Image (cartoon, rainbow, N blue to C red):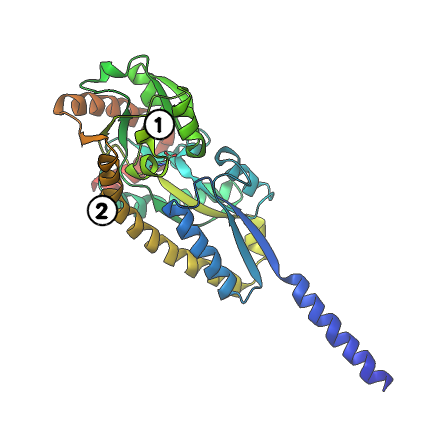
Amino acid sequence: MKLANTLLAATALAGIGAAAQAEKWDMPMAYAASNFHSEVGATFASCVTDGTGGELEIVTHPSGSLFGGAEIKRAVMTGQAMIGERLLSAHQNENALYGVDSIPFLVSSFDEHEKLWSIAQPYVEKALEEDNLHYVYSVPWPPQGLYMNKELTDIEGMKGVKFRSYSAATAKMAELTGALPVQVEAAELSQALATGVAESFISSGATGYDRKVWEHLSHFYEVDAWLPRNAVFVNLDAWNDLSDEAKTVITDCGATAAAEGLQKSIDYTNFTLDELKKNGMSVERASDHLMGQLQEMGEVMTAEWLETAGDDGKAIVDAYKGE
Ligand code: PCA
């Protein structure tokens, strides 16, 4: 009887032990809950929670509510959060490879972008690993165009204009055009436009739609400058501590999320440009003259990127161009 009791107690304790091992990971995300990246992240989180039978629960925190966009990568590197999503190119100053998706006019369509990414991904995974991060999946934003509060016929029209930047490349673009860069996260974009802190920016139709920028701006010029990516990564120590089963679930859910996110991004492109129009904005392709000027600027930026990204950067671009 005594032995049976002891056994019962031991079994109960083992049960509690298993329950205590169940982990909850908070997943900070910078963009609004209704944005397609955040929706894909929420589906990914449920996929992992369900797939591990609750052994690992992932809870998303969109809109920069847990960590602001600028803090997410560091938070995951240092284990303040175990997983997070971040716009990769916002960290180009730390490692040029994070800006491989923001080389101006190297790619301008989803197909071209995916080709570039398939070549660049292993290099970026390695860069993340050096930052104590394990890469899980990433999803491109739609092609980037110019938002303005007035008609823009040439690059000179950007002189002195307050230009919201989200990365080194967007800040550089401001510098080269004589605009005044101001770094603002998308979560604060509407406020920046409303208060006049920013009066133009480069981004996708998706972000203009999410932030209802027609309340403040009048023109969107399709220039298809590049397609930047949001990446989801896990703290490397936390990753190494996971069971093989949990790792497989995360990897599989990540692959599904990447495919779902790409499709959503493609579908969202025309939908959001139509919505900008419906809400009164002028949406058109930039004139040949303006495109020519932007492309010249792009060449300067590409040369600079290649210089900073060294052999790896050159290898990626050469492989992409088939050289
Ligand atoms: N939207 C994000 C990054 C690229 C995009 O299309 C933003 O503006 O912050």
* Tag 2: amino acid: Asp
Q: Is residue 68 left or right of residue 125?
A: right
Q: Secondary structure at mark 2?
A: helix
Q: Residue at x 55, y 41 (%)?
A: 66
Q: CA distance from mark 1 to mark 2?
A: 22 Å
Quarter of the rendered image showing ligand 1: top left
Residue 318 in the image, given as x and y percentages of width and height: 25, 38
Residue 269 in the image, given as x and y percentages of width and height: 25, 43
Residue 316 in the image, given as x and y percentages of width and height: 30, 40
Q: Is residue 105 above or below residue 2?
A: above
Where is mark 2, residue-wise?
111
Nearest the eye: 300 or 156:
156
* Tag 1: amino acid: Ala
Residue 120 in the image, given as x and y percentages of width and height: 34, 43
Where is mark 1, residue-wise?
169
Nearest the eye: 20 or 199:
199
Q: Residue at x 34, y 17 (%)?
A: 175
